[in-house]
Amino acid sequence: MLVAAGHVRLLFRCVRHVFAKYAVAPSLFGAVRHNRGIELPAGSVRRIQSRARSGTQHFTTGKLVRNGVDNKAAVICIEGNIASGKTTCLEYFSKTSNIEVLTEPVSKWRNVRGHNPLALMYQDPERWGITLQTYVQLTLLDRHMLARSSPVRMMERSIFSAKYIFVENLFKSGKMPEVDYAVLSEWFDWLTTNISIPVDLIVYLQTSPQTCHERLEQRCREEEKVIPLEYLESIHQLYEDWLIKQSSSPLPAPVLVIPADYDLQKMLHQYEENRDKILAANNL
Ligand SMILES: Nc1ncnc2c1ncn2[C@@H]1O[C@H](COP(=O)(O)OP(=O)(O)O)[C@@H](O)[C@H]1O
Ligand SMILES: Cc1cn([C@H]2C[C@H](O)[C@@H](COP(=O)(O)O)O2)c(=O)[nH]c1=O
C-alpha cells in the first residue's frame, strides 16, 4: 500500500516537472499554470493545428507542444536490441552537418539523485521495474520535446519502444505486477494522446540476440552483467513483432530495416548506403 502510494507521488512529481519545464499544463490539472501556480498568458500553451507530413502516421492536431519547437525538423529514431550498435550508428551520423544527435539518457537511468534505478531493476525487476520505467518514460519524453537545433534529429530509441518493448517485456515475463503495468499504460496513453511526439522514420538495426550478447559482454556495463541471452531473445522477439511483423503495437512512423550483425567496417558502409533513405525523412 505504502509502495503504491509512493509510486503515485513519484508519477505526479514527474508530470509536474515536465509541465513546469515546458510551460504547458494538461486538462487533468484544470487551468493553465506554471510551477508557481500563476496563470500563464494564453499564448504560452500551443496546440498544434496541423502537421502536414505525409510520412507521419500519427495524429498531432490539437496536441500540446513546447513553445519554440520547430515542428518542421525531421525526427529519426534509431531502434534495436541492447548493444545492437545504436550509439555507434549515432556517433557516425553525428559527424554530418545539419544532423543533431540525441543519445539515450542512460547516465540518468544509472544516477538519479544518487540512486541507480537501472541496477535496481536488473537486481529485482518486480520491485523496481515501475521505478525505472517511470523515469525512462519521463526522460525520453523530455528528449522528444527538446527544442530542435538542426533540420534533422536522430535520437536513440523513443518513448514508444520503452513502452512497447521494455514495459511489455517486464509484464509479459511476469516480472511486473498488473497494477504497475496498468498505471504505466495509463500514463503512456495520456502522454501520447495529449502531447505532440512526432517521429518521421524508425531505423531498425536488426541483429541476432547472439550478436548483442557478444557486444554486451564486450561493452561490459556493470549493471548489465546479469543479462542472460534469453533476455535479449525476448527483447528481440518484441522488436520483430513490432517493427517487422507489425502485429503487436502501433507504428508511429515508417520503418527502415538495416541488418546489423556485420563488423564495424561493413556497418559503416551500410550506413553510407542508407544515408539518402534516412535523410529523405527530412523531405517528407
Ligand atoms: N558492428 C559492430 N561490430 C562489433 N562491435 C560493435 C559494432 N557496433 C558496435 N560495436 C560495439 O558493441 C558494443 C555495443 O555497441 P553500442 O553502439 O553501444 O550499442 P547500443 O547503443 O545499441 O547499446 C560497443 O562496445 C561497441 O563498440
Ligand atoms: C529504453 C529502456 C532501456 N532499458 C535498459 C536496457 C539497457 O540495459 C539500457 C539501455 O542500453 P542500450 O545499450 O542503449 O540498449 O537500458 C530498460 O530497462 N528499459 C527501457 O525502457
Image (cartoon, rainbow, N blue to C red):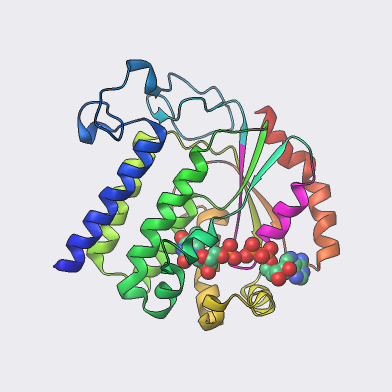
Residue stretch rendered in magenta on the structure: 75-96
**Where's ligand 1: which quadrant?**
bottom right
| 117 vs 162: above or below | below
Snapshot quadrant of residue 136: bottom left
Q: Nearer the viewer, residue 252 or 31?
A: 31
Total tally of numbered discs in the picture: 0
Give the percent coordinates (x, y) of residue 17: 35, 44
In this view, the residue farthest toward the left is 1
Q: Residue at x 74, y 40 (%)?
A: 277
| 243 vs 121: above or below | above
Q: Nearer the viewer, residue 157 or 11?
A: 11
Residue 83 falls within the magenta-colored stretch: yes
Whether residue 81 is visible = no
Give the percent coordinates (x, y) of residue 108: 49, 59
Q: Is residue 10 left or right of residue 197?
A: left
Q: Nearer the viewer, residue 47 or 107?
A: 107
Q: Is residue 101 left or right of residue 19?
A: right
Whether residue 3 is visible = yes
Q: Residue at x 35, y 48 (%)?
A: 188
Q: Is residue 209 left or right of residue 41?
A: right
